[in-house]
Amino acid sequence: DAMVIQNPRYQVTQFGKPVTLSCSQTLNHNVMYWYQQKSSQAPKLLFHYYDKDFNNEADTPDNFQSRRPNTSFCFLDIRSPGLGDAAMYLCATSSRRDSGNEQYFGPGTRLTVT
Amino acid sequence: AQKITQTQPGMFVQEKEAVTLDCTYDTSDQSYGLFWYKQPSSGEMIFLIYQGSYDEQNATEGRYSLNFQKARKSANLVISASQLGDSAMYFCAMRRSSNQFYFGTGTSLTVIP
């Protein structure tokens, strides 16, 4: 089945140690998103790609970077994780630049920072 | 700034009854989309229903319907004939034409047998 895959599902990293989360999709969607969701909170958009066009949210810390080497893959790099970065990270895709299209979410990666 | 407001942190409903989850939004965009997602305790986000800003009729998907009142900037979700499996967090979200998505703070729904 076409889907959005996130690896790993659980990631433990040390304070200050760089970590990369990955997302892949078989839907061939133009748009890919990264969200941070802390416990009992709404998902917060970090950035999104429309094809190779990167769009950063104004309040996303510089500590968070992203790469999209091709249509199928997108990576979230956290350069120096702090304790406050512990959260669920959700990847999502959408099919085109149109307000009508829903997002398809991956299962998320739960990040723990020790 | 774009904003989604869900004023009900928690709701309870009796099994088989209907429930309305409130959502208001604030945007200066003319074209936008409104969505409802369900997030069970397992963490996955499940798409429920969509309403476009230019759609004149309220969206329906099975037991889900969206009560869209554009002038009031509200997009309430109605779940009919509640089931125990409906217990979850429900998020209202808005998509701008720039592809940005914004989520409300969510409503935790508990269905009581």
Image: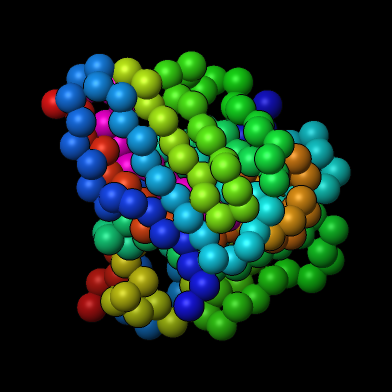
Q: Is residue A29 or residue B34 the one in the foreground?
A: A29
Q: Is residue A114 left or right of residue A73?
A: left
Q: Position of residue B5 (x, y in %)?
A: 55, 40
View extreme (left): residue: A114
- Residue under the image location 81 percent in, 39 percent down: B29
Q: Position of residue A50 (x, y in %)?
A: 69, 44
Asked if residue A86 lies in the magenta stretch, the reply is yes
View extreme (front): residue: A69
Query: Would you identify the image quadrant in which residue B52 lies?
Result: bottom right
> Is residue B5 among what the camera can see?
no
> Is residue B58 among what the camera can see?
yes
Seen in the picture, residue B83 relative to B98 is either above or below; the reply is: below
Q: Position of residue A111 (x, y in %)?
A: 26, 38
Question: Which region of the structure is painted magenta?
Answer: A81-93
Q: Is residue A52 or residue B13 the one in the foreground?
A: A52
Seen in the picture, residue B33 relative to B104 is either above or below; the reply is: below
- Residue under the image location 68 percent in, 53 percent down: A30
Q: Is residue A18 or residue B43 the one in the foreground?
A: A18
The image quadrant where one finds the N terminus of chain B is top right
